[in-house]
């Protein structure tokens, strides 16, 4: 006796979903995304749809696609606003965003681009407020700005360009009073 068509369709869905879960466990993010995306159409099972969005969020995050990961986390949270897995994926997005910002800021520091480093570190602080690493980055960038202004002031003083030297020293003092 053949299986009822609805039962066979459910079994096919389950096999496809399990293939996506297996690809996820193996770290194959592209296959995970391809295998799980069709299950988002089956809105009759909130848990299955929620789990698919969470796994898609995690796979996109691990593939480095923060925008897609954020989109999938938002979808999961719409289904279950208290879902720990979706919240955890969102935290992973925040961590990845923070790390990318701090790497960019470090590159700016290494190149002596002090003001750009400060702006990027401020962005990092919006992701992780009161973070010591980002605050230290701002401090190092301010030190660089101070040293440049002080050196410029000294150079101008050596050339007897007193008004310009005073302006440069005042700029240095504005960065680091005292």
Image: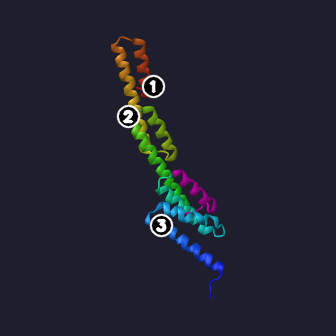
Q: Choose between 174 and 124: the one closer to the eye.
A: 124
| Residue assigned mark 2 | 111
The foreground one among 64 and 80 is 64
In the structure shown, which secondary structural element does the residue marked by tag 1 occupy? helix
Q: Residue at x 52, y 72 (%)?
A: 18
Assess disc 3: are there few (<14), some (14-19) or many (≥20) residues with their C-alpha within 10 Å of its C-alpha.
many
Query: In front here: 166 or 117?
Result: 117
Instruction: Identify the mark nearer the N-term, 2 or 1.
Output: 2
- Asked if the residues shown at circle 1 and circle 3 are in contact, with their CB atoms under 8 angstroms apart, the answer is no
Tag 2 and tag 1, C-beta contact below 8 Å:
no
Label 1 crowd (10 A; few <14 / some 14-19 / many >=20)? few
The label nearer to you, 1 versus 3, is 3
Residue ID at (48%, 69%): 22
Quick one: label 2, few (<14), some, or many (20+) residues within 10 Å? few
In the image, 123: left or right of 178?
A: right
Q: Is residue 85 visible?
A: no
Q: Height in image: 39 above or below 142?
A: below
Q: Quadrant of the N terminus?
A: bottom right
Q: Which residue is mark 3?
A: 23
- Indicate whether 172 appears above or below 127: above
Q: Which mark is residue 174?
A: 1
Where residue 155 sits in the image (x, y, percent)?
34, 18
């Amino acid at each position: 006796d053949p299986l009822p068509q609805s039962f066979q369709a459910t079994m096919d869905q389950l096999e496809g979903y399990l293939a996506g879960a297996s690809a996820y466990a193996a770290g194959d993010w592209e296959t995970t995304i391809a295998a799980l995306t069709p299950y988002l159409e089956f809105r009759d099972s909130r848990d299955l749809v929620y789990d698919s969005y969470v796994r898609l969020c995690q796979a996109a995050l691990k593939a480095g696609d923060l925008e897609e990961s954020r989109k999938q986390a938002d979808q999961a949270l719409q289904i279950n606003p208290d879902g720990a897995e979706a919240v955890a994926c969102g935290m992973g997005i925040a961590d990845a965003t923070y790390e990318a910002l701090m790497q960019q800021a470090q590159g700016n520091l290494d190149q002596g681009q002090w003001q750009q480093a400060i702006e990027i570190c401020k962005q990092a602080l919006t992701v992780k407020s009161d973070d010591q690493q980002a605050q230290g980055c701002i401090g190092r960038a301010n030190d660089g700005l101070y040293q440049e202004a002080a050196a410029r002031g000294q150079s101008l003083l050596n050339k007897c360009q007193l008004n310009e030297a005073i302006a440069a020293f005042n700029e240095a003092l504005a960065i680091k009073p005292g």
